[in-house]
Amino acid sequence: MFSWLKNLQGKVTLKEVLLAKTMAFPGKYLFLPHVLKVSPFCHFIFPMNSSLHTTATLISRKVKFECTSRDNPAVIVDYTAPIGEGEGYTSLEIFLVSLSTCVASSVALLLRKKGFTVTGLTVTANGERREEHPTCFKTIALDFRLSSPDLTEQAVTEALAVSEKNFCPVWAMVKGNVEINTSFNITRA
C-alpha cells in the first residue's frame, strides 16, 4: 500500500504519513516542511504510477494525429501547411501547454497551501526556436497573471522557485537545455 515510501529512504515514518494524510486533501499525502526539510512550503506527494501511457494515431494522409491518454477526450496534433493540414496543435505548442500547466498547477497548490487565495491564474508561454535543425526551443518565457486579494510578490517568487527546483517534472526535463524565464503580475481581486 505504501510501496512508494521506499523512495523517501526512511526520511519519514508511517505515523507521519498517516498524520499528514489527515491534514491533506482526501487521497493525497501532505508532508510538512519539518519532515522533508526542503522548502518553506508544504509538500504534496501524490501516489501515482511511475509509468504513463499515451497513444498517437495517424488520421490523415499527411501528419495529423489523434492523441489520447487514459479516458480523456482526444487531442488533435498536426503540423502547419504544407507538411500538415494545420488542423490541430503542433507538438511544440503541446509542449508549451504542458510546461505552462505543470508550473501553474504547482504554483497554485503551493500558494493555496501557504494560505493565499488564488482566484485566477493564466499563463502565457512564448518559445523562441533555433533556426537550425532540430528547431527546438532555445528560450521560453512564462508570464503568469494571478488574481488574488492577499497574494504577495515574495510568495509568488518563492512558489516559482520551488516549482522549478522540486515539483514540475516538465521543467526538470528541459532544465539546462532551454533557458526558461518567468514573469508575473498580481491583480487584486
Image (cartoon, helix red, strand yellow):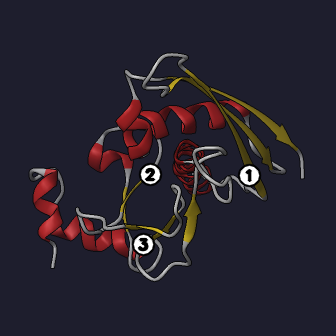
Q: Position of residue 90 (x, y in %)?
A: 58, 48
- Secondary structure of residue under mark 2: loop
> Cα distance, mark 1 to mark 2?
20 Å
Mark 3: which amino acid?
Answer: Ser
Instruction: Find residue 12 and name its label.
Output: none
Q: Earlier in the sequence, mark 1 or mark 3?
A: 3
Q: Position of residue 187 (x, y in %)?
A: 87, 43
Instruction: Find residue 42 and name its label.
Output: 2
Q: Is residue 147 left or right of residue 77?
A: right
Question: Which of the image's four quarters has the N terminus?
Answer: bottom left
Callout 3 crowding tier (Cα within 10 Å): few <14, some 14–19, many ≥20: few
Residue displayed at 58% across by 55% down? 78
Query: Pointer 1: what residue?
Result: 121
Callout 1 crowding tier (Cα within 10 Å): few <14, some 14–19, many ≥20: some
Q: Is residue 1 left or right of residue 174?
A: left
Query: Pointer 3: what residue?
Result: 69
Q: Quadrant of residue 140?
A: top right
Q: Earlier in the sequence, mark 3 or mark 2?
A: 2
Residue displayed at 31% across by 71% down? 19
Callout 2 crowding tier (Cα within 10 Å): few <14, some 14–19, many ≥20: some
Q: Residue furthest front?
A: 61
The answer to which of 108 and 35 lies nearer the viewer is 108
The answer to which of 87 and 129 lies nearer the viewer is 87
- Secondary structure of residue under mark 1: strand
